[in-house]
Image (tube, grey):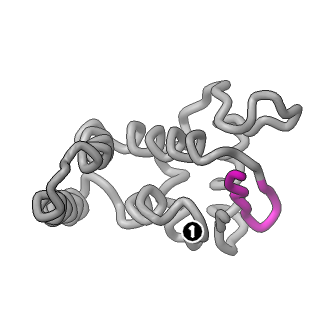
């Protein structure tokens, strides 16, 4: 069981871990400040107290709002990074934001299923984002 990510003309299959790593890469390429904050989301799993978890999320979400207001990260990138792993969807405007941080970066890193001959790479996923940014429609993942 995994994720299919699809634009108007392209698609790729990958696992939840690979999709998470790709979204972390988007955060990394956006800015150090946003990347560090995005990584902090994993900290909530180490908080055993439910009330403290709620406080963590309040602080966490306020910081996201502040980063958007400061121009550190766009709403499109935030939408892409924080939508659920299943049944997520971004529009062309969001795809343009995401593609703007991916555009000049290339790497041959696998994010898909390594044993599959059509293993999704960074450049495959970047092409899906570019397809939506340039040709319209939405990117969906399910």
- Image x and y of residue 38, in percent: 31, 47
Considering every residue shown, the one lying at the far top of the view is: 108
Q: Is residue 3 magenta?
A: yes
User: Circle 1 sits in a helix, a strand or a loop, which is it?
Assistant: strand
Q: How many numbered badges does the structure rendering display?
A: 1
| Front residue of 108 and 87 | 87
Nearer to us in this view, 121 or 93: 121
Residue at the right extreme of this rendering: 117
User: Is residue 91 or residue 135 the one in the foreground?
Assistant: 91
Q: Which residue is mark 1?
A: 88
Q: As drawn, is 87 to the left or to the right of 46? A: right
Dividing the picture into quarters, in which one does residue 40 lie? top left
Q: Residue furthest front?
A: 48
Residue 76 percent coordinates (x, y): 43, 64
Q: Residue at x 55, y 52 (%)?
A: 99
In the rendered image, residue 125, in percent from the top left (x then y), is placed at 67, 46
Q: Which residues are magenta?
A: 1-11
Can residue 69 be seen in this snapshot? no
- The residue depicted at 19 percent of the width and 58 percent of the height is 60
Q: Position of residue 16 (x, y in %)?
A: 59, 47
Q: Quadrant of residue 138?
A: bottom right
Q: Is residue 58 magenta?
A: no
Quadrant location, the C terminus: bottom right
Alpha-carbon neighbours of circle 1 within 10 Å: few (<14), some, or many (≥20)?
Answer: some
Residue pictured at 17% horizontal, 62% vertical: 50
């Amino acid at each position: 069981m995994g994720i299919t990510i699809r634009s108007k003309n392209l698609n790729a299959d990958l696992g939840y871990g690979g999709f998470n790593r790709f979204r972390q890469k988007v955060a990394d390429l956006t800015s150090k400040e946003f990347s560090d904050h995005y990584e902090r989301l994993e900290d909530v799993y180490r908080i055993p107290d439910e009330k403290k978890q709620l406080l963590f999320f309040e602080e966490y979400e306020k910081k996201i709002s502040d980063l958007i207001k400061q121009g550190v990260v766009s709403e499109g990138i935030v939408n892409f990074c924080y939508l659920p792993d299943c049944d997520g969807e971004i529009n062309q405007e969001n795809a343009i934001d995401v593609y703007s941080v991916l555009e000049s970066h290339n790497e041959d890193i696998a994010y898909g299923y390594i044993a599959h001959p059509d293993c999704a790479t960074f450049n495959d996923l970047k092409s899906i984002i570019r397809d939506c940014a340039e040709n319209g429609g939405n990117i969906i993942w399910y």
